Image: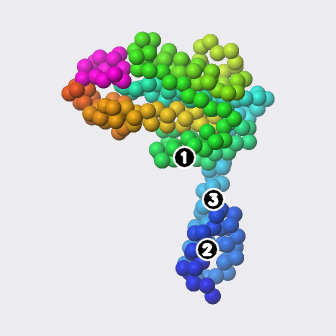
Amino acid sequence: MKSIRDIKEEFQTAVDLETKEKLAQSYQTDSRKGVQDLIARVYREKEKLQSELERLEGMKQFEKKYADYTAICGIDEAGRGPLAGPVVAGAVILPKDCSILYLNDSKQVSASRRDELFDEIQEKAIASAVGIVSPQRIDEINILQATYEAMHQAVERLKVTPDLLLVDAVTIPAMPMKQVGIIKGDAKSVSIAAASILAKVTRDRMMVEYDALYPEYGFAKHKGYGSQMHIEAIREYGSCPIHRRTFIKNFY
């Protein structure tokens, strides 16, 4: 009889859930507690995966509703609220049969998982792009108009022209194709969620780069948002070139 250690190693080296399940079935009659614990772990993993697949299926309701459209593009932004840095918009067209596990509103996903999803989205997307509008432009035209401008940029940079836009919360002015604005769309549409991840990761990486240029503000930690640490740094050091002057006028 194999030792529990050897059996555990078999489960650990199994390449996928299907292989693990076959192992679990082969050891079903082994009554040792250690083996039964390994089997139970596999079935918990299977249940968790099934639950995730069902959640993702629920996030495809708008993609299914508008399935007659050829290229459905999700659009979302990151960085409307911060005191510093650009506003970034993401635009993503996913294949109709695309499945990306754990895809969700970027605010509901850990930083490490966002990085993994960012790579997977770019690998699987039919087309993806970002639009970036500077703090100076935000001060010039206001954050809402700057957000629209970033969204326009993102759509224009796609290598495939979409015929339907699914947009988180807003309707973008002067776009030639049909739009559907969805409140909290980044939690209701896989296309918008993918755009949310793209925008968030792009902006966060930019803020880490800015942190190297202006280390006294702590941009790598708060990403430009109005944390107490950030506000105190502004009061101590003044503004820097990536601050939004119209956002910090109340305390500087």
Residue at the image position 61 percent from the left and 40 percent from the top: 121
| Left or right for 177, reference 242 | right
Magenta region: which residues? Answer: 238-252
Q: Nearer the viewer, residue 217 or 177?
A: 217
Which element carries disc 1, helix, strand or loop? helix
Q: Amino acid at mark 2?
A: Glu
Horizontal and vertical percent for residue 166? Answer: 64, 27
Sooner in the amino-acid sequence: mark 1 or mark 3: 3
Q: Nearer the viewer, residue 46 or 141?
A: 141
Q: Residues within 10 Å of mark 3 (few under 14, many from 20)?
A: few
Q: Amino acid at mark 3?
A: Glu
Which element carries disc 3, helix, strand or loop? helix
**What secondary structure is the magenta-colored segment mainly?**
loop
Which element carries disc 2, helix, strand or loop? helix
Q: Residues within 10 Å of mark 1 (few under 14, many from 20)?
A: few
Residue at the image position 73 percent from the left and 31 percent from the top: 65
Residue at the image position 51 percent from the left and 38 percent from the top: 106
Q: Is residue 2 above or below residue 122?
A: below
Residue at the image position 56 percent from the left and 41 percent from the top: 118
Q: Residue 116 got which mark?
A: 1
Which residue matches tag 3?
Answer: 47
| Left or right for 238, reference 152 | left
Q: Is residue 108 above or below residue 165?
A: below
Which residue matches tag 2?
Answer: 10
